[in-house]
Image: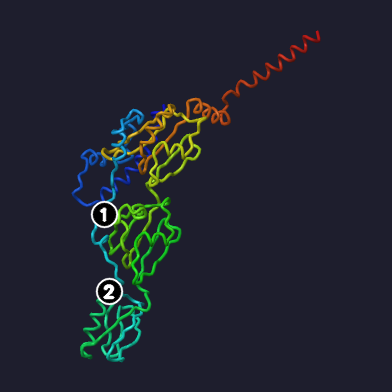
Amino acid sequence: MLSKFLKLFFFSVLLSSCTAQNIIETSVSTGINKNPRSKQASDKSYGNYNIQDVEINFIRVNKLTDNEINYYNDKKLDLLDHTVKTHKDIYNYNYEYVLGPSDIININLTDSDDIDDTYKIDENGMIDLPVAGKVKISDLKITEAHNILRSVIREFYKNPDLQITVEEFNSSKVYVVGAVKTQITINLNQEPIKLIEAAIKAGFDKVSGTKGFLRRDNTVYKINLENAYQSIDDKENFYLKKNDVIFIDTNSDAIHVFGEVIKPGVYYPNLDYSLTELISTSGLNQLTANAEKVYVIRENYEKFLKIDVFILDISNPINFIAGRKFKLQPKDIVYIPPTKIVKWNRVISLLLPQTDLFNSYNPIIQDGVKGGANANQTGDTG
């Protein structure tokens, strides 16, 4: 019965995960090799699947060798396409301030004060010079704007010596949204800012979410703030650019723990839990838990509708060593079932208040007791 129950539960969990997997596969670039069986199976509507379609592979953790445990620890599928660290134009980007509408600049001409003044860039990206007229300088770096203005003024002044400074930085912004304490807009200036600095300003909490997206120049990239935060990969902690949008996702890769534990719920894979550590953290209910069967449910992406179910017997304390070596992965489901007697007691406790089970015997029992009592009294009297 337990096996049938697990299959039914596993299948319902897997269908939601498979839906996400199907969406991801259709969004990646062409040329990705797909399992022919997966392609054939995906033609079948989900409503037509049943338990018999799900392949379940049971693996006993305490019987694995160290090499086999390492194999499963390292067997991770990276579904992230278009990650930032694969794009040189992002991680090699050297920040320079880019002018735009509402910026206020100061122009100083050494040999003349005809145009010395402060100018606000208008909504069309232009400033209006007294002699030269309107000149477009938006979307230019300061050095580029200097060259444009110098070439324009040269028509009126011989060998002009021109200096430009930005007095107010108003146009260049980046946005940090999503799973942060405060969704903020950061005004950029001539000082560069990196991803992790912006995330910290917004109240980034690495427990709430460590992955997300960068939208830059109408293209979306995947980012990993955990790598940036821990300096695991410098490419992940890149300089931000004007109009960047950083979306920090809630931790959708969370590990779900339920069953006979004191603290069921969501745990975060970035904390690098081993199975033993997670059992200890969630608090095994020693009175009700079936310690012989701790389940870890993990989708196997190598085949459509296949899951691996890892089983650890912790009734023998020596198996905690194997559990300590076995690392949990994003989206794992940890389930600790109750003992048989606990399941039976729970069924009975649910049935008794809502059914007439045993109640039909009460009148007989009660009448019998009363009758017996009356009979005894009659006998004593006689």
Residue 7 seen: no
- Residue 34's x, y, as percent? 21, 43
Which residue is pictured at 44% across the width and 59% down the height? 203
Q: Nearer the viewer, residue 176 or 13?
A: 176
The amino acid type, in three-letter code, at marker 1 is His
Relative vertical location of residue 53 with respect to residue 112 in this rendering, above or below:
above
- Residue 341's x, y, as percent? 50, 25
Q: Is residue 282 left or right of residue 118?
A: right
Q: Which is nearer the N-term, disc 1 or disc 2?
A: 1
| Quadrant where the N terminus is found in the figure | top left
Relative vertical location of residue 327 with respect to residue 126 in this rendering, above or below:
above
Q: Secondary structure at mark 1?
A: loop
Relative vertical location of residue 146 with respect to residue 37 in this rendering, above or below:
below
Which residue is pictured at 50% across the width and 38% down the height? 262
The amino acid type, in three-letter code, at marker 2 is Lys
Q: Which residue is mark 1?
A: 82
Q: CA distance from mark 1 to mark 2?
A: 28 Å
Q: Are marks 1 and 2 in contact (CB under 8 Å)?
A: no
- Residue 211's x, y, as percent? 35, 53
Q: Secondary structure at mark 2?
A: loop
Q: Residues within 10 Å of mark 1 (few under 14, many from 20)?
A: some
What is the number of the mark on residue 141?
2
